[in-house]
Amino acid sequence: MSIHIAAKPGEIAEAVLLPGDPLRAQFIAENFLEKPFRYTEVRNMLGYTGAYKGKKVSVQGTGMGIPSISIYANELFKDYGVKRAIRVGTAGSLRQEVALRDLVLAMTASTDSGANTIRFRGRSYAPAASFSLLKTAYDAAVSRGWQPKVGNVVCSDMFYTEDPEEWKLWAKFGCLAVEMESAELYTLAAKYGREALSILTISDSMITHETTTAEERRTAFTRMMDVALETAVS
């Protein structure tokens, strides 16, 4: 039992989906998993375990930002023996070719966060996804007729930045989208020798200024949930 999750031993599966929004965790559990049960509600950060195609899978809310996902990923890897962690989150498009509601598979995650600067004592580290999970997710998406975008994303520490044009520098160097968690998830997976992948849905665009509703972000982005579950049990 860990401080922030408080699940009993054996209640969490080796494969876990990680939505930022705990209500998205609830939606996935209630609509995709067989016989789900809630193993935690500490701080209302909901976690569930059930079965998908007969295989045990968990889904755990993580909150927003690197400090929050760091707490949950550390405890899942260290205290519960999770082997595969798949983020299912939203992101903002930084490029014209990445449209609203597109699927993005984060191959690598650049960041402006100070977390790895502190961790590696000023050195640079390149957080990257597990190739096996990345390939499985890509193949699963393509087999369903979807064409996910694959590449580098930006993991930002600040949602409301002081420079509203800052995103253009990341876009200039090919970054597809911006979100707030993947760099830490990938770094911790490497630390503990586990596998991790972020599967993202574009919820808004820095290019077109289009956006989606909170309800849509919570319940309508089912393609990434489907691909993530297929990847988790493969």
Image (tube, helix red, strand yellow):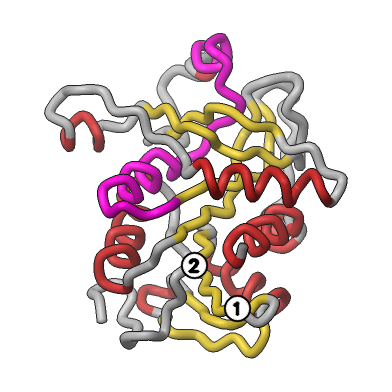
Residue at image position (52%, 55%) is: 86
Q: How many residues crowd around disc 1 within 10 Å: few (fewer than 14), some, or many (20 or more)?
A: some
The image quarter containing residue 56 is bottom right
- In magenta stretch: residue 171: yes
Q: How many residues crowd around disc 2 within 10 Å: few (fewer than 14), some, or many (20 or more)?
A: many
Residue 55, numbered label? 1
Q: In the image shown, does 203 or 14 lie closer to the viewer?
A: 14
Q: Which residues are magenta?
A: 168-195
Q: In the image shown, does 130 or 26 lie closer to the viewer?
A: 130
- Percent x, y for residue 172? 56, 9
- In magenta stretch: residue 233: no
Determine whether 176 is above or below 106 in the image.
above
At label 2, the amino acid type is Ala
SS state under label 2: strand
- Placement of the C terminus among the 4 image quadrants: bottom right
The image quarter containing residue 116 is top left
Residue 161, numbered label? none
- Percent x, y for residue 208? 75, 24
The image quarter containing residue 71 is bottom left
Work out which residue is located at the far right of the displayed protein and give it: 145
Q: In the image shown, does 192 or 88 lie closer to the viewer?
A: 192
SS state under label 1: strand
Q: Which residue is mark 2?
A: 15
Tell me if I can see residue 158 in this picture.
Answer: no
- Percent x, y for residue 193? 31, 52
Labelled pair 2, 1 in contact (Cβ < 8 Å): yes
Between the residue at mark 2 and the residue at mark 1, the CA separation in whole angstroms equals 10 Å
Q: In the image shown, does 18 or 227 lie closer to the viewer?
A: 227
At label 1, the amino acid type is Lys
Q: Earlier in the sequence, mark 2 or mark 1?
A: 2
- Placement of the N terminus among the 4 image quadrants: bottom left
Residue at image position (68%, 36%) is: 204
